[in-house]
Image (cartoon, coloured by chain):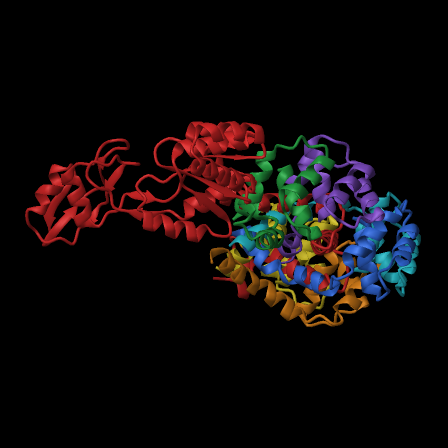
Chain colours: A purple, B blue, C cyan, D green, E orange, F yellow, G red
Amino acid sequence: MEYVYAALILNESGEEINEDNLTDVLDAAGVDVEESRVKALVAALEDVDIEEAVEEAAAAPVAAGGAAGG
Amino acid sequence: MEYVYAALILNESGEEINEDNLTDVLDAAGVDVEESRVKALVAALEDVDIEEAVEEAAAAPVAAGGAAGG
Amino acid sequence: MEYVYAALILNESGEEINEDNLTDVLDAAGVDVEESRVKALVAALEDVDIEEAVEEAAAAPVAAGGAAGG
Amino acid sequence: MEYVYAALILNESGEEINEDNLTDVLDAAGVDVEESRVKALVAALEDVDIEEAVEEAAAAPVAAGGAAGG
Amino acid sequence: MEYVYAALILNESGEEINEDNLTDVLDAAGVDVEESRVKALVAALEDVDIEEAVEEAAAAPVAAGGAAGG
Amino acid sequence: MEYVYAALILNESGEEINEDNLTDVLDAAGVDVEESRVKALVAALEDVDIEEAVEEAAAAPVAAGGAAGG
Amino acid sequence: MSAESERKTETIPQWKEEEVDAIAEMLESYESVGVVDITGIPSRQLQDMRRDLHGTAELRVSRNTLLVRALEEVDDGLEELTEYVTGQVGLIGTDSNPFSLYQELEASKTPAPIGAGEVAPNDIVIPEGDTGVDPGPFVGELQSIGADARIQEGSIQVLSDSTVLETGEEVSQDLANVLNELGIEPKEVGLDLRAVYADGVRFEPDELELDVEEYESDIKAAVSGAFNLSVNAEYPTSTTVTTMLQTARGEAKSLALAAAIEDPEVVPDLVSKADAQVRALAAQIDDEEALPEELQE
């Protein structure tokens, strides 16, 4: 989750969530940064409204199957 | 979620969930595959027992249904 | 569920959910494809709004959370 | 929350959550670090079992949603 | 759901749930029968104890209600 | 329940739920049809919104199950 | 500094100079320096406190003039603390941060009785309840200091929480006697931090209070938020990938149920669903003759 936390700090500080910035934050925290994970995160966040995604509860939708099936 | 779906197909077919196989499945579906996201998924799945995770979801519906009704 | 996952990947990639495409995806995943199941799936999905059906699953998590809390 | 996120990254990277490390992470993220907030966080975390809090939150991430539903 | 309903009628009348019988029932109801779905359903029902599935559905709500109340 | 299932099949196929159609479906399923029950069912369904009843069951099977059981 | 010291040597006695130097040296060796109020702490208790602090903080008591001199001698911002050196105080040095120091000092405070003539550090309340004292003149003493006391069920009872003295007021002999009789210890005795100076910043106690529970809930909120973001943005981590798998499966199952897909995994659920639907429909039918026997009442 450290990569996600890093993105969230950048989001709050208003800095751009790009590979360089993420790497800097993680480096500073002593994380052994994996470039591919940084890239993947940047790609995943590209079209995401972070505020919204943070607030929307993300639980496994087991209920849907259950509700429909039960 | 296409990357996760692909992992679940591989899980059902019994094939190994590695970068090559995931990429093949996604390619076949016409997905513009991002290597970094494939890598991130494989890394995240490393210590996860997919069977168990999926079964948990399958077991939950009764409780979930109860909550919905309650 | 592998057939359903395959349909969901095609749905996300925007490719048509037809027999050929489903077979390609399943093939790539090493699934021993049964033609009649592919046909049945295509037929079953014909008049279904996949987005909507999937969103129902996404809407349910509250119930799941309730179960956890109850 | 950026101070808390910073602490959580350090917690995951296994680095000590002290003033220097927190300041480094926040600096790297372009945060205009307030020393007293860093100090307060370090002091407060002395009395918090972070591991436990993290596990609780991750096990029931819907807590917010759950509360609403339950 | 008409295919499933048809199977359940056959189950109640004590007739075998095979392709011919399903097709007959659906035909009689004016359904434009797709052979592949009939096949898939028969195959899928092979290992299913219908009585049990129905009873579970009847039993589940009670348990679920209990969970919600507890 | 076979009579009610027969009505549900007709509902999905879009055929009218009348005595003839119900009898045809039940006949095809090898049911020994009782005319008076067919009549009674047709009359009873006249004032029922089948779509609604069925959707409610799918959406909140707990309630439905409870009602049926009570 | 040494030139200044030499000049002072001429004006104050040697022992004072040595004491100031020693205090200054001690202050310089710590990252945080604070002024603590030690009013009313008996010297033996002060010794105990000093011992308890050992390892995390060092307490130094001396004449205030010498403490002030030492603070000024160290300079470095510490002279900002001189205004707090009044009454009975000591200087405390620690390497832990000011917030931690404050928490620690607060936690080490112990309740103590208050004597006549002392000023109430906070409202003094006699709590509602049975005093356990047999009926007698004591009920009058209670009433005279303002407690809502009465004889009831064979003992003297206080009928409601009674504030008998407000913050800043002086304790009377009568009140002291009653409190003593009831075993009420309204004072919090301990090292009372007046101010602390660290890394160029001066903190006062009201700035140093921490709501640890709030931090804990912030952590949980941060973790939940990150969790949600990870799942909603479809960025898998080892923490969230299980939920994502379950989400994907739930979606597939929802679709399979909605479309009545004849998948072996879903068919039992479809059968259940059909059963639920047929029961729901049957429940809408008023005419019992139209229903199968199993559903007739």
Q: Is residue E28 among what the camera can see?
A: yes
Tally of numbered discs: 0
From the viewer's perspective, is residue G203 above or below residue E59? above
Q: Is residue G10 left or right of residue G142?
A: right
Q: Quadrant of residue G174?
A: top left
Q: Identify which residue, G254 or F39, lies in the foreground.
A: G254
Q: Residue furthest left?
A: G136
Left of B31 or right of it: where is F26?
left
**Does G46 appear above or below F25?**
above
Residue D44, given in percent of the width and then of the height, sits at: 53, 44
Tell me if residue C68 comes above or below residue G141 in the rendering: below
Does residue E32 appear in this view? no
Residue G50 lies, in percent from the top left, at 42, 49
Image x and y of residue G187, in percent:
29, 43
Question: On the rendered structure, is G8 left or right of C40?
Answer: left
Residue that extends furthest to the front in the rendered view of this protein: G10
Name the residue: 81% across, 44% down.
Answer: A38
- The N terminus of chain E sits in image quarter: bottom right
The structure residue drawn at horizontal position 55% and vertical position 65%, both measured from the top left corner, is E59
Residue drawn at 17 percent across, 40 percent down: G175
**Nearer to me, G19 or F48:** G19
Q: Nearer the viewer, residue G64 or D61?
A: G64
